[in-house]
Image: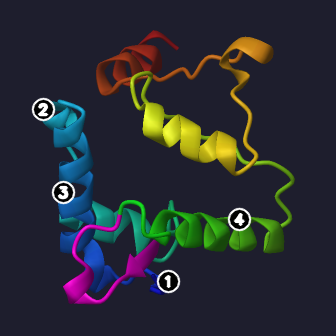
Amino acid sequence: MECLIRPAKSSDCETLMSFIKEIAALHNLLHEVVISAEDLKADGFGKEPFFKCLLAEAPPENAGTQDKGVGRQLLAKVVEVALAAGCTSMKFATMEGNRRAKEFYLRLGAHDTTQSEDWHCMEFGKEALQRLVQEL
């Protein structure tokens, strides 16, 4: 299925939030979503954005995009943007139980560095960040 892949605009922040919440709910992590559409606008579309975002737009009659090539097209565009910016690799994470995502990325040529290179994804939560700053 062909879709339009474009840079997100500040007016897309409500849509982005719905995607974030949908994915979080799918993984029983909705309680961890603490960002808002207003936060996305401030963080991604201000004078010095913290992130860039691409959106894939599919025709409304094609509701549900799994197994229709949209993810592959979106990933290809992300890679195109990364290569144009001089990136030489791309690191990302998937949930342990998300077999479909892992198989998708492996099929496209990614390799799982969890075992082969002993990489582990680390995260400081908000409380740990605050505690770290106070201790310095």
| Mark closer to the chain start, 4 or 3 | 3
Q: Which residues fall within the magenta stretch? A: 54-65
Left or right, 78 with respect to 65, comes to: right
Choose mark 1 or mark 3, whichever is in front.
Answer: 1
Choose mark 3 or mark 2, whichever is in front.
Answer: 2
Write the residue at 57% across / 23% down: 121
Residue to which mark 3 is pinned: 36
Residue to which mark 2 is pinned: 31
Asked which quadrant contains residue 25, the reply is top left
Write the residue at 31% across / 63% down: 40
- Alpha carbon of mark 4 to alpha carbon of mark 3: how far? 27 Å
Query: Which residue type does callout 3 highlight?
Result: Ser
Q: Secondary structure at mark 4?
A: helix
Q: Residues within 10 Å of mark 2 (few under 14, many from 20)?
A: few
Query: Which residue type does callout 4 highlight?
Result: Val
Residue to which mark 4 is pinned: 79
Write the residue at 20% across / 66% down: 38
Choose mark 1 or mark 2, whichever is in front.
Answer: 1
Residue to which mark 1 is pinned: 5
Q: Is residue 36 above or below residue 55?
A: above
Q: Secondary structure at mark 1?
A: strand
| Mark closer to the chain start, 1 or 2 | 1
- Residue 26: in magenta span: no
Asked which quadrant contains residue 86, the reply is bottom right
- Alpha carbon of mark 1 to alpha carbon of mark 2: how far? 30 Å
